[in-house]
């Protein structure tokens, strides 16, 4: 069960974009099209998984005094590999992402998971954490990119969606449109999270074992 919780944590409970509000720069910059969001998300996921695995393997070897520079070197190595592969096999996407592909090195999501999770947990759990966080990041960017592309260009992954009679709202392809879509998605996620929390609290209040459950949780901290 712990493995499942670790994997789903980054997708739902602690989604790096829509809940933790991390990686905002690439989120707003590259999501003018759905394919760009998907490409950036998959590239970040690959770097997250690989760097988490290596950092977890080397956590007892890396001196505490130089752990952050060491993490950055490891992450930058995988970013270089992903960039070269994308340049060779997906050149159009590589050119569309541009500088933001290299900036994955300083993405606070990757460095944060390395410091907070990979450096303290097993290789398997670190891999699951990277995959979950990366998938959550990918889903968020793809969804934002889809909304902006449909309303801003009338297409989705290059396919015509809106009838030609309907004029696209080009502001969705600009920075104000990105902020608008981003803010609306965060608001929707917060609404459902609060509704879910209320349902859980109401269910717990009617549970005859609430006292024992609370005592058990207090002992965990």
Image: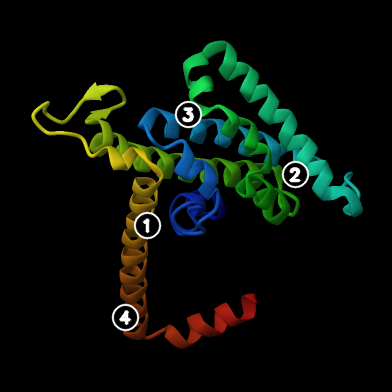
Mark yes or no: residue 39 visible.
Answer: yes
Q: Which of the two marks, 1 or 4, is nearer to us in this view?
A: 1
Residue pointed to by mark 2: 56
Does label 2 or label 3 sit earlier along the sequence?
3
Q: Which mark is residue 183?
A: 1
Where is residue 183? Give x, y as percent.
Answer: 37, 57
Q: Secondary structure at mark 2?
A: helix
Q: Is the Cβ of the residue at disc 1 closer than 8 Å to that at disc 3?
A: no
The quadrant where residue 102 appears: top right
Residue situated in front as seen by the camera: 95 or 46: 95
**Mark 1 or 3 closer to N-term?**
3
List the residue tagged with mark 3.
39
Q: Are marks 4 and 3 in contact (CB under 8 Å)?
A: no
Q: Residues within 10 Å of mark 4 (few under 14, many from 20)?
A: few
Residue 208, placed above or below residue 10? below
Q: Residue at x 60, y 48 (%)?
A: 109
- Which element is circle 4 on? helix
């Amino acid at each position: 069960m712990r493995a499942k919780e670790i994997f789903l944590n980054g997708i739902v409970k602690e989604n790096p974009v829509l809940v933790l509000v991390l990686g905002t720069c690439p989120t707003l910059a590259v999501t003018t099209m759905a394919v760009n969001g998907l490409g950036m998300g998959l590239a970040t996921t690959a770097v997250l998984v690989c760097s988490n695995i290596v950092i977890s393997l080397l956590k007892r070897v890396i001196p505490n005094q130089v752990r952050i520079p060491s993490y950055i070197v490891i992450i930058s190595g995988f970013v270089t590999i992903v960039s070269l592969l994308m340049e060779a096999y997906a050149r159009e996407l590589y050119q569309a992402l541009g500088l933001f592909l290299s900036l994955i090195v300083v993405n606070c999501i990757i460095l944060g998971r390395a410091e907070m999770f990979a450096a303290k947990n097993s290789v398997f759990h670190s891999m699951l954490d990277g995959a979950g966080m990366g998938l959550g990041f990918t889903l968020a960017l793809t969804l934002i990119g889809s909304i902006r592309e449909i309303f801003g260009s009338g297409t989705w992954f290059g396919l015509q969606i809106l009838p030609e009679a309907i004029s696209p709202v080009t502001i969705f392809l600009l920075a104000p449109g990105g902020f608008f879509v981003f803010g609306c998605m965060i608001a929707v996620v917060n609404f459902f999270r609060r509704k879910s929390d209320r349902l859980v609290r109401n269910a717990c209040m009617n549970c005859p074992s609430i006292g024992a459950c609370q005592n058990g949780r207090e002992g965990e901290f």
